[in-house]
Structures are given as structure tokens and as C-alpha cells.
Image (cartoon, grey):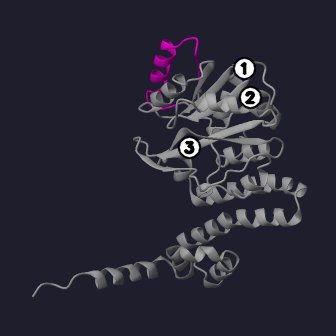
Amino acid sequence: MQLSSKKPLVSVIILCYNQAEIIGRAIESVLEQTYQNIQVVIVDDCSKDNSRQVIESWQAKYPGKIKTYFQQVNVGHPANMNTGYRLCDGELITFCDGDDWYFPEKVQREVNYLMNNPDVDVVHSNFDFYTVDGVFLKHWVSNNNKIPAGDIFLSLFSLHYPFKIHLRYELTSKKVIQETGYYDEQIPIWVDWDFRLRLAAKYKFGYCNYVGSAYTDNPEGLTNVLKQEIILKNLQVVIEKNKLHLEKYPVKEAEKAMKAIRLPLKKLTLAINTQKGQTNFFKTLAFLWHYPNQTKELRFVINSMFGKRLMGTLSAIKQKLLKPAPAK
């Protein structure tokens, strides 16, 4: 990517919805970046708490640094993100959810990466998992993980990433985002993945080996509150929408990617059937035949084959066996 200067303006979108108590952490982490030529664009999705007052207090402190937009009605994550994209003035754009935060050199290191690798169009960094209260949980990338670079479409499509969780908070140009077509507002979830798949179908990615951000494992996050049926439906939508890009790869590689992404589809389907009491011994066997490594998930396998009642009975028996005998 050819940049206009050594210090291009970077717009950082911060999305907010009912995060009055923690949004300040995200804002402060962006304002305290070692890279100074930053514009902060905060888009609030019609919060019901006092997020607006908190955001406006930050804007009053940094009037030339922060641009805000407050939705009049709740528009959902994809439309809120697109509002942020269109408000950005920067040559480069990245983003941060209101419950997450950046570490100090995130933007500087990624800008440097693009400067030093002109063949790369999109760059992302490592990140750590935290609780909402700020307690460290784990690293996304350890020394044993190799993160794909260059043409990453097959890896991204098959979710060949640590914990099956793909990249976060990529930095790219406004031009690239516009050419990719923004977020798809017709799907409520998997929109980040869908957008990145469309990016990866056209552009080269780079990986910056620096822990650039903190990702909070929020029990009130969107994917944690949506029903499994909705998650499955929209996962299928994104796969169908993007599998056409597999045609440019060798048949065996494309088939391998499709097999990998069918795993969460089939697993979700079995889990939904279990929830409905529709267990199926032979469908589970067929699943294990295609994905033998799933046999290690004993609870899932037993529930899928025989229902949750059997697993509960086995657990009760185990507790009785382990219970110490009463003293005489």
C-alpha cells in the first residue's frame, strides 16, 4: 500500500451501546497511542444508559480530536459500523469495540508495517483475552502459532486460527474499505468475518507480532445472547455468500476449506437438535466419521447420541462413587 505521507491521519472508530461504565477505557486507550496523528470517531447506537453524556464529556476535553455520532434509533452493529466508516476523515481506518481497548503502540506498529511492506493492504496484530473487569485470561497467538499472511482467504474461510477466532481490529485504507463495500447490513452476526472474507478475496494481509488490543469475553456480547438457530442461519448465509471465491484455488485446497467450515455447521446443528430433545445416534456417528478429532469432546458426543439425561445420570453416579464413606 502506498501512503501519502509518513504520518497519515488514522481514524479509529469506537462503537458503543450501553457501555457508559467502560467506554472511557476504550477512548482513553486510543487517545494515549504513541502514534499521535489520530482521529477518534465514536458512534453510539442509541444507548439507553448515560453513554451519551460520558462520550460528550470526552469530546469536550478533546474537541479537535473526537468526532461523535448518536443514532436516533437502534440500528444494529453492521449499520452502526458503516456510519463510523463514512464519518472517518483518515487515510487509514481501524476500530475498537466499546468494551475493548488498545495497548499503546498498536497504531504505530501497524502504520510502520504498512510503510515497510508496500505489497500489503491490510494489517492486524495479536490480541489478548480479558474479562470485562480487566482480568487477563489468555493470549490469542502464542509462540507455537503461525498466523497466515499474504493471501489468507482459505485460512480465513476455514477459520484456521487460534481458538477458531479470526483476526481483530485490522488497519487498512479508506479506499480499500470503500472498494470492498462496507458491512452487510442484512446479517446481524458474522458481519466482521463476512467483511474480512471479502477483503481477503481481493487484498493481501500482513500480521504484526505485537499484542495490540484487549478483547473482552463479555457474557452480554451479541453472539452470546442470540439463539443458536440464528447463529447457525447466519453462519450458513456468510458461507454461501463467500464460497464462490474458492473457485480460484486448487480443488483439493477448496474442498479442505469447505470441510473445515462445515464442522461448526454440523456441530451447531447437532447441538440444536439436542436442545430440542432430538438426539440421533447414527447422525452423530457420521459426524465423528468425518471429524474423528471431535471424539475427545465426550460430553457433546454423549448428549448428541443419547440426550442430556444420560449425561446427567452418569455425572450423578460419578459423584456417588467419589463421595467419601461416612465415618463409623
Q: Position of residue 112 (x, y in %)?
A: 68, 29
Asked if residue 202 is positioned above or below residue 272 in the image, the reply reads: above
Query: In the rendered structure, which segment of residues is drawn in magenta?
Result: 47-70
Image side of residue 272 versus residue 290, left or right: left
The residue carrying mark 3 is 127
Image coords of residue 314 (percent x, y): 40, 82
Q: Is residue 58 inside the magenta stretch?
A: yes
Which numbered disc, 3 or 1, marks the residue closer to the eye?
A: 1
Labels 3 and 1: the sequence-earlier one: 1
Which SS class for mark 3? strand
Report whether 128 appears left or right of 86.
Answer: left
Q: Which mark is residue 115?
A: 2
Helix, strand or loop for disc 2? helix
Structural crowding at the residue carrying mark 2, measured as other residues with C-alpha within 10 Å and reported as few (<14), some (14–19) or many (≥20): some
The answer to whether mark 2 and mark 3 are in CB contact below 8 A is no
Q: Residues within 10 Å of mark 3 (few under 14, many from 20)?
A: many
The residue furthest bottom is 328
Q: Earlier in the sequence, mark 2 or mark 1?
A: 1
List the residue tagged with mark 1: 6
Q: Which quadrant does the C terminus fall into?
A: bottom left
At horizontal 58% and vertical 50% (from top left) the residue drawn is 141
- Mark 2 vs mark 1, CA separation in Å: 8 Å
Is 154 or 305 nearer to us in this picture?
154
Could you tell me residue 97's position as x and y percent?
A: 56, 36
Tell me which amino acid carries mark 3: Phe
Q: Name the quadrant of the N terminus.
A: top right
